Image (cartoon, rainbow, N blue to C red):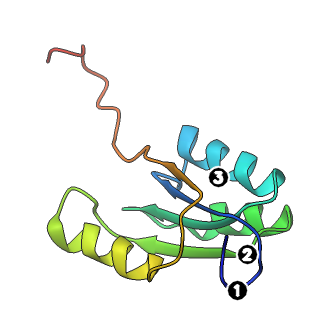
Amino acid sequence: MNDISGRPLAVITGASSGIGRELALECARHGYDLLIAADRPLEESAAACRAEGAQVQTVEADLATPQGVESLHAAIGGRAVDALLANAGHGLGHAFLD
């Protein structure tokens, strides 16, 4: 449970758009508070999730780097994570093996 609100905490990576944003919205709709991360701006996703009643914390970081992972870990701050939706990454428009 999230120490601040008593609601469960979901951590969603890649939450700035697409599937990650939709996963964050679903978690918000189902009673989770959120820590959302992406290497792109998160203001619009955070606002949409707050509109669903969630408390939202954001981390803008490149999770392909040790520094980015450390930023996300620091933001979690020892809280229990009830759901982790690891969706970070970019579709490059190539065939899978390319």
Name the residue: 37% across, 71% down: 72
Name the residue: 66% across, 43% down: 22
Q: Earlier in the sequence, mark 1 or mark 3?
A: 1
Q: Determine crowd level at label 1: few under 14, some 14-19, many 20+ residues with C-alpha closer than 10 A.
A: few
- Answer left or right for 89 relative to 65: right
Specify the quadrant of the image occupied by residue 96.
top left
Q: Disc 1 vs disc 3: Cβ atoms closer than 8 Å?
A: no
Give the label on residue 29, or none. Answer: none
Q: Earlier in the sequence, mark 2 or mark 1?
A: 1
Mark 2 or mark 1: which is in front? 1
Give the label on residue 55, or none. Answer: 2
- The kind of secondary structure element at disc 1 is loop
Give percent across and percent down for residue 67: 19, 74
In this orientation, which residue lies closer to the viewer: 98 or 84?
Answer: 84
Q: Amino acid at mark 1?
A: Ile
Q: Amino acid at mark 2?
A: Gln
Specify the quadrant of the image occupied by residue 57.
bottom right
Q: Which residue is mark 3?
A: 24
Q: Disc 2 vs disc 1: Cβ atoms closer than 8 Å?
A: yes
